[in-house]
Amino acid sequence: MKNKLTDKQKQIAKYLLVFLVVFTVILAVVVKVKEHKSNIRLETAGEIKKAIKEVYKKVEVELPDLETTKIDKNDKYALESFTGLKSAEDVNFVIVSEPLISAQSYSLVIVKLNNNLNIEKVKQQMYDNVKMDKWICVSAEKLYITNYGNAIFLVMSSNETATAVYNAFKEYTKNGIGKTLTKEETFSNNEGFLVQ
């Protein structure tokens, strides 16, 4: 007696096989995406400094000579000057990347918060209070503030440079950023006319 499958049984077997193949592919993609996102870590000062170097490698405009350093969050003057924050209450630490010559309008700041509770509130405080004209004789034209997890990213410079660095950060984080705040500075020329 031969054991033959009926047409219905063959059809069910095909559907099961297709289902298993599709399920396996979907599972592999989900695992790969999770692996890929988990490779981006902005938890320690070292990881953030490394991330800034990687972001700079992706930037297609010329950047000035920069120094990247951790600042003392308890130095109220430095904290406010770099971040616009008046208190370090929610801050774990701050990494700053700025030109060695301070007459160039460029600043990249990453503020690592203690947790995720007040991210939007802290971003708004930075947006409201950071001074885009803190340099001698120059001002930043464009400001971007966003976050990746509980690391708040701020960049301000010329429109072209700030946009290029922001886009490189967005690419580095695989578009895993939060809400972005932007601001453009308007300037007046010698005759008092606004210049954009």
Image (tube, rainbow, N blue to C red):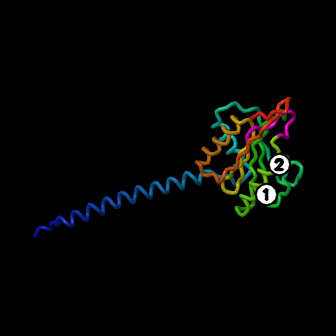
Residue 96 seen by the camera: yes
- Image x and y of residue 186, in percent: 78, 38
Does the stretch in magenta take in 10?
Answer: no
The quarter of the picture where residue 119 lies is bottom right
Q: Work out how far the residue at label 2 is from the one at label 1, CA to CA, in angstroms.
A: 12 Å
Task: Tell me the residue at 79%/51% (across/down).
Answer: 128
Task: Tell me the residue at 74%/41% (across/down).
Answer: 184
In front of the other: 140 or 192: 192
Would residue 39 appear left or right of 123 to someone viewing this image?
left
- Of labels 2 and 1, earlier in sequence is 2
Question: Local crowd at mark 1 within 10 Å, few (<14), some, or many (≥20)?
Answer: some
Disc marking residue 91: 1
Q: Residue furthest left?
A: 1
**Is 163 located above or below residue 74 in the figure?**
above
Q: Is mark 2 on a helix, strand or loop?
A: strand
Disc marking residue 71: 2
Q: Please identify the quadrant where the C terminus is shown.
A: top right
Q: What range of the chain is rendered magenta?
A: 133-142
- Image x and y of residue 20, in percent: 35, 61
- Image x and y of residue 76, in percent: 89, 52
Of the residues shown, which amino acid type is indicated by label 1?
Val
Residue 67 seen by the camera: no
Would residue 117 appear left or right of 36 to someone viewing this image?
right
In front of the other: 185 or 173: 185
**Is 146 located above or below residue 27 in the figure?**
above
Task: Tell me the residue at 85%/40% (across/down).
Answer: 134
Of the residues shown, which amino acid type is indicated by label 2?
Ile
